[in-house]
Amino acid sequence: MDASTALGARKAPGRSLHRFANPGRFLRLAALVQPWLTWPALVITAAGLLGGLFLSPADYQQGDTVRIMYIHVPCAWLASQGYAALAAASFVSIVWRHPLADLAAREIGPVGAVATAVCLATGSLWGKPMWGAWWVWDARLTSVLILFFLYIGHIMVVRAFDSAERGFRAGAILALIGAVDLPIIKYSVNWWNSLHQPASITLTGAPTIAGSLLWPLALSTLGITLGFWAVVTANLRSAVMERRIGGLLMAQAERT
Amino acid sequence: MTHLPYILASYGIFAVAAVVVAIMASLRLGSTTRRLRALDNRKTGP
């Protein structure tokens, strides 16, 4: 194998990723995917939340307050999932200088921050009747609050520089450093004494939640997750088109 | 239903957040699509 072949082989992962950085190809693919995210998100979320409100039973200890879980849990899951995606996009941006990854990280930030804010607000609304307090400086609650500040920090940093490239680099570094908060959120209820209950659904064991409460939770989680990615996809399509508009206007200005 | 105000507030916050985020994304997508189409037409026009 000669040197150029070896170099080509080493570049292969980057090259295959750059195939999707082609704006035209991305826009065509995203336009196809968009309705498959949006419409199922609406139908499944409505089914999950209506089921959670009217069909699932009240919990024997929490009473009807358990119905807040059908919003709180999907938002908590999306807060972490969104930040993991933001950190992954930032990694791709730093390693491969993938232009689409920069835009993806920028567009995930605000939607993730909204999911985290709803998670914190609904958690607080659940905490008041159940714990007797709107807020406690518990490890789980505090680590999610830090995640919210990380989202806000990322949103501000990527927009803080005159040069978009420098903003993306600084945002990517912040996102990767902030990713350390994700395992802390996940394991905070195991590592420390916490008021927050441990996970009811794990990959390794059977769920510790009754089936009559589980199905609306599964539906609302699926629906809200699809909705989250539908909004991110729509915003990313807009961002790609805005970049193309900027390029066209610049070319037009140079011609005249 | 017990603790109804807390439940209504939770669903209300979620509904407002979801509707605002979805409408903003939809308006932005519509506006950029129209602007890009207009520029492309101007570029390929006579």
Image (cartoon, grey):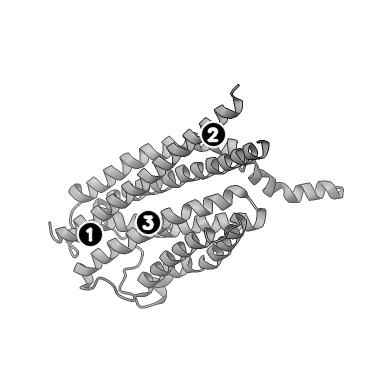
Q: Which type of secondary structure does the marked residue at label 3 adopt?
A: helix
Q: Nearer the viewer, residue A223 or B19?
A: B19
Between discs 2 and 1, the one toward the N terminus: 2
Q: Which residue is mark 1?
A: A66
Kindly identify which residue carries mark 2: A28
In the rendered image, is residue A216 in sight? yes
At numbered mark 1, what does the secondary structure look like: helix, strand or loop?
helix
> Where is residue A80, by image quadrant?
bottom left
Q: Which mark is residue A115?
A: 3
Which residue is at a point 23% across and 46% down the rendered structure image? A51
- Tell me if residue A207 can be seen: no
Report in which chain the residue with disc 3 lies.
A
Q: Residue at x 27, y 66 (%)?
A: A124
* Amino acid residing under circle 3: Ala
- Going 61% across and 49% down the picture, which residue do you hit? A99
What distance separates the C-alpha of mark 1 from that of mark 3?
19 Å
Task: Choose between A20 and A150: the one closer to the eye.
Answer: A150
For marks 2 and 1, give the CA distance.
Answer: 42 Å
